[in-house]
């Protein structure tokens, strides 16, 4: 047990003086550690109470320097600021904005920025893929097309522009009916199986372009399940038979524009079109069938579709000048194309205004040379001759028409969500 004499000796120990000089060279944090260590040792040796204050840290002094507006003219006070007060000082939090307002903000983002916002948090992921933002999508420029198209289809896209793209296999397991109304896959590289899967899940299509694609009887039959179809572009398509084509034309009772030019057709295909086309069609492109289209076919066509306004029968070498006697029965005809119908004599092109009083455009490329073209234009005032080299019938982005929305449009309507290159 320690005695007062022992306490005095402890106080005068030279080792403590060394420790004290050593403390002066340490920083504040090391001093605290040493003090704690020595206090513990002193306690174990029953150090008298008068030595404890010597090694104990002094009381904290309040800072009198004011910082910030809330401490002006006051002593500094440490306090925990409430969360509500922090948010009120920093502005409105995104967490407090309603979904409707955030959707309105996301509406103005391009496609790549919208995808970036989807990884912020779970709420933003849900809002970024809200179907209201994916009404119309242009995927031109997307590198990994298959996963992008898969996600877009799941998002409930209604208007899809994806021409001249490479589309790998898609998975349709568990996919419901697609709300697609307009779709452009012109010139894309896509397997028949994948295209069948897309068409199989569509029954609300109104405008469709599959130009240049390999089709199948199942795809044509799938189009029959779209009774609202108004514009259909199958130009240059192949590998489907005449029977499902005839059934599709009969079923689509609202079809207004049909481009079925330059397909891999036999005479049976041509007759299926002529004999089963609906009377609602006002724009028809049936060009490119050389020996397959005859005058008798034209007679049936005029009888079935008396309201045709635009008709393209170019490259039909079986037609001759007597076809004008049949075509003049079309009282609403505005645009007639007979380019490269080489058996039509140039003399039959005179007095066109009398033969076709409503005609505005006439395309006869390959029939009239430049010297005769000038005189023909003088003889036919009010008719634009050879001014439209490419057909615009049922095409989503016609080359002849200058669109106010640029190249990012389909059927005269802007596609909102697209990649900005």
Image (cartoon, rainbow, N blue to C red):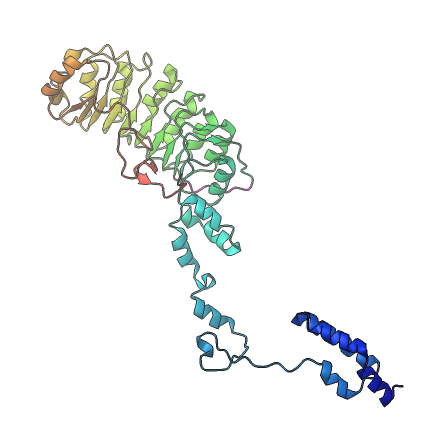
Residue at image position (86%, 85%) is 6
Q: Residue furthest right?
A: 1
Q: Position of residue 361 (x, y in %)?
A: 19, 25
Quick check: can you spot residue 36? no
How would you classify the magenta stretch by its main secondary structure?
loop
Question: Taking 150 as reference, is 389 above or below it?
Answer: above
Q: Residue 307 falls in which quadrant of the image?
A: top left
- Looking at the rendering, the stretch of residues picked out in magenta corresponds to 174-180
Question: Taking 232 as reference, is 118 above or below it?
Answer: below
Q: Nearer the viewer, residue 241 or 164?
A: 164
Question: Taking 294 as reference, is 105 above or below it?
Answer: below
Is 241 placed left or right of 62 in the picture?
left
Question: Taking 242 as reference, is 143 above or below it?
Answer: below
> Is residue 256 highlighted in magenta?
no
Q: Nearer the viewer, residue 70 or 225?
A: 70
Q: Quadrant of the N terminus?
A: bottom right
Is 322 placed left or right of 375 in the picture?
right
């Amino acid at each position: 047990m320690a005695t007062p004499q022992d306490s005095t000796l402890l106080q005068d120990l030279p080792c403590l003086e060394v420790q004290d000089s050593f403390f002066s060279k340490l920083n504040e944090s090391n001093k605290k550690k040493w003090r704690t260590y020595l206090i513990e040792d002193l306690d174990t040796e029953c150090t008298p109470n008068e030595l404890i204050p010597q090694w104990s840290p002094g009381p904290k002094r309040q800072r009198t320097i004011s910082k910030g507006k809330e401490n002006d003219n006051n002593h500094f006070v440490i306090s925990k600021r409430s969360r509500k007060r922090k948010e009120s000082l920093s502005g409105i939090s995104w967490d407090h904005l309603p979904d409707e307002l955030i959707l309105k903000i996301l509406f103005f983002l391009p496609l790549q920025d919208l995808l970036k916002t989807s990884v912020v948090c779970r709420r933003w992921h849900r809002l970024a893929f809200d179907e209201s933002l994916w009404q119309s999508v242009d995927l031109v420029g997307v590198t990994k097309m298959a996963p992008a198209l898969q996600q877009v289809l799941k998002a409930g896209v209604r208007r899809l522009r994806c021409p001249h793209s490479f589309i790998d296999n898609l998975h349709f397991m568990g996919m419901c009916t697609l709300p697609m109304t307009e779709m452009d896959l012109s010139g894309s590289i896509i397997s028949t199986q994948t295209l069948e899967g897309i068409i199989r899940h569509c029954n609300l299509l109104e405008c469709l372009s599959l130009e240049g694609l390999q089709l199948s009887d199942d795809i044509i039959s799938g189009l029959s399940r779209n009774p609202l179809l108004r514009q259909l572009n199958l130009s240059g398509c192949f590998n489907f038979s005449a029977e499902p084509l005839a059934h599709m034309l009969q079923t689509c009772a609202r079809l207004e524009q049909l481009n079925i030019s330059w397909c891999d057709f036999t005479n049976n295909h041509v007759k299926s079109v002529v004999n089963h086309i609906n009377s609602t069609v006002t724009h028809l492109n049936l060009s490119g069938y050389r020996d397959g289209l005859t005058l008798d076919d034209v007679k049936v066509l005029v009888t079935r579709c008396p309201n045709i306004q635009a008709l393209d029968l170019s490259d039909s070498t079986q037609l001759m000048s007597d076809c004008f006697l049949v075509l003049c029965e079309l009282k609403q005809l505005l645009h007639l194309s007979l380019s490269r119908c080489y058996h039509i004599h140039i003399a039959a092109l005179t007095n066109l205004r009398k033969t076709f009083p409503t005609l505005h455009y006439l395309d006869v490329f390959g029939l009239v040379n430049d010297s005769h073209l000038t005189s023909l234009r003088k003889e036919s005032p009010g008719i634009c001759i050879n001014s439209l080299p490419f057909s615009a019938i049922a095409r989503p982005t016609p080359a002849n028409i200058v669109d106010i929305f640029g190249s990012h449009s389909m059927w005269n309507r802007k596609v909102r969500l697209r990649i900005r290159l």
